[in-house]
Amino acid sequence: MFGFFKTTVLGGILFLVPIVVFVVVLAKALQLAHKIASPIAARLPLDSIGGFALVEIIALVIVVLGCFIAGLAARTPTARKLVYLLESNVLENIPAYALMKAKSGSILDPDDTSDMKPVMVQFDDSWQIGFEIDRVAVNKSLIYLPGAPDAWSGSVCAVTMDRLQPLAMSIKEVSILMKRLGKGAPPVLGELLRQHS
């Protein structure tokens, strides 16, 4: 019972940390933008638009524009070098930052997953759902084995191709299946396992 309570509390903390950090950063950004927006709003004839204070709308626009400009700047080599120096010398010494970075960095862009093929991988007397990433030799494939409940936290291994069976599922369906700890597995899994029992 205590183990369940401890695990649940730790899971809640890990879930809440990025949300709290996001809310705090957004609140500070809006507070700063409000100081810039106040003199601008004072010069305009309107006090509100659609029931929202004009100064709040301007502050929100400033934050959005600031994020857009920062996103553009982040693409430059100079900005990437500065971010790397900041991370390696300061931010990575903060445990919460390192955890969030590792978590967000493990999520692939849609373009990165386009070539991944869902498969069933045979290990001795068991089967495991995986993604075929690439062919690494004439008869071997590099396989990513998703974890549960987080499909984007797993392991990578190389197996011979005779251990692989194509899986008639999408990447999204596999991710949902992992999140649900396998509950409600589609009939295709049972059929495939019956064929290779």
Image (cartoon, rainbow, N blue to C red):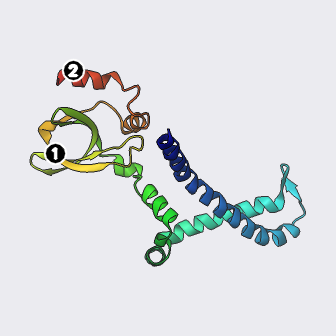
Which amino acid does the dot numbered 2 rest on?
Arg
| The C terminus: image quadrant | top left
Residue 87: percent from left, percent from top: 47, 73
Which residue is nearer to you in this view: 171 or 197?
197
The disc, 1 or 2, on the residue closer to the chain's N-terminal end is: 1
The residue at the point 10 percent across, 45 percent down is 139
Q: Residues within 10 Å of mark 2 (few under 14, many from 20)?
A: few
The Cα–Cα distance between marks 1 and 2, rounded to whole angstroms, is 22 Å
Number of numbered tags placed on the structure image: 2
Q: Secondary structure at mark 2?
A: helix
Residue 169 vs residue 37: left or right?
left
Q: Secondary structure at mark 1?
A: strand
The residue at the point 74 percent across, 66 percent down is 31
- Which image quadrant is residue 33 in? bottom right
- Residue 64 vertical placement versus 16 (above, below): below
Which residue is nearer to you in this view: 91 or 59?
91
Residue 174 vs residue 80: left or right?
left
For disc 2, the marked residue is: 194
Which amino acid does the dot numbered 1 rest on?
Val
For disc 1, the marked residue is: 159
Which residue is nearer to you in this view: 174 or 40?
174
Q: Residues within 10 Å of mark 1 (few under 14, many from 20)?
A: many
Residue 24: percent from left, percent from top: 66, 61
- Which image quadrant is residue 187 in? top left
- Residue 40 vertical placement versus 155 (above, below): below
Residue 131: percent from left, percent from top: 28, 42
- Residue 110 vertical placement versus 102 (above, below): above
- Residue 90 vertical placement versus 159 (above, below): below
